[in-house]
Amino acid sequence: MREGSSVGGRATGAMGVAPHALALLALTLLAVVATWPLAANFTTALPSIPAERGQDVWQNAWNFWWTREALLARHANPYRTDALFYPLGASLYLHSLNLPQSLLGLPLLPAIGLVATYNLVTLLMLVATGYCAFLLTRYVSGSAPAALVAAFVVLCSPQRLDELRQSQLPTLSDYGLPLALLLALVTVRRRSWRWALATAAVVLVAGLSSWYHLFHLLILFALLMLWEAAGAYRRSGWAGARAALVPWLWIAGLSALVCAPLLLPATVEAATAA
């Protein structure tokens, strides 16, 4: 009896993993096809149109180098550099440093070089965003096929492919948006501060990828919070609406707390520059 239960449990676990493995495989193949001929020139070319609109490729490649230089060679804050505007240096708090992806490149740079690192991270970001869209859609709809269609649409959307041609790696790295929305929904359903903390951590990662993602999440969270509060009000009046706001207050407070060390100097810099 126990043996049968164990076998049944393993089979159920395998069935649970299979949709995710198939989704990742399909998204990886789709990313290679959508970016072709990038894979054929993986170590010799960067994904960029040869015009002014694609010039950001150089600053995004520089981000990989500078993050490694600052953290491993100089043991310094990567958001401050003297490699620009020497000898005065420059603050990078308002610069799209794309820190999470640059950190991902730390072990890759000495192993495969800058060009291949840039290209590999680009493909990983496409797959990651598609997969996070898959997770969000599956959670909301309960349908793996529908989630896979949504992931394909997100990965191959005209805006995303245009961002790829313009070498906008920071904005292309928006996997944090669907993932943060998913975790926020789980927080609301389970009413757990631990899930709120996980949501805040993803909000931080999204903001570190690009400040635009943080602004987009603020808008999305506000709309979703109002929707949840309105539904609770219709069901239970003001008491229900107030109760529905509690998980969102957890998310807001924890997100502000984890983002403050970077948001505060960025805000000061923006105010000073203005």
Image: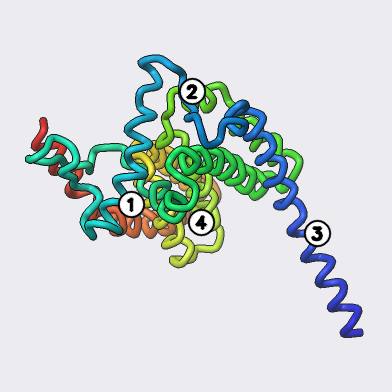
Per the image, the residue denoted by label 3 is: 15
Q: Check the image and tell me how it is coloured.
A: rainbow
Instruction: Identify the mark nearer the N-term, 1 or 2.
Output: 1
Q: Position of residue 108 (x, y in %)?
A: 47, 51
Label 4: how many Cα within 10 Å (few below 14, some 14–19, many 20+)? many
Badge 4 amino acid = Val
Instruction: Identify the mark nearer the N-term, 3 or 4.
Output: 3
Q: Secondary structure at mark 2?
A: helix
Label 3: how many Cα within 10 Å (few below 14, some 14–19, many 20+)? few
Per the image, the residue denoted by label 1 is: 68
In the foreground, 224 or 235:
224
Do labels 1 and 2 touch, CB within 8 Å?
A: no
In the foreground, 36 or 116:
116
Q: Is residue 4 left or right of residue 185?
A: right
Question: Closer to the observer: label 2 or label 4?
Answer: 2
Do labels 3 and 4 touch, CB within 8 Å?
A: no
Per the image, the residue denoted by label 2 is: 165
Per the image, the residue denoted by label 4 is: 188
Q: Position of residue 28 (x, y in %)?
A: 66, 41
Q: Residue 69, can we see it?
A: yes
> Which residue is at a point 39% across and 39% down the rendered structure image?
213
Query: Between marks 4 and 1, how big is the CA–CA gap?
Result: 38 Å
Query: Between marks 2 and 3, how big is the CA–CA gap?
Result: 38 Å
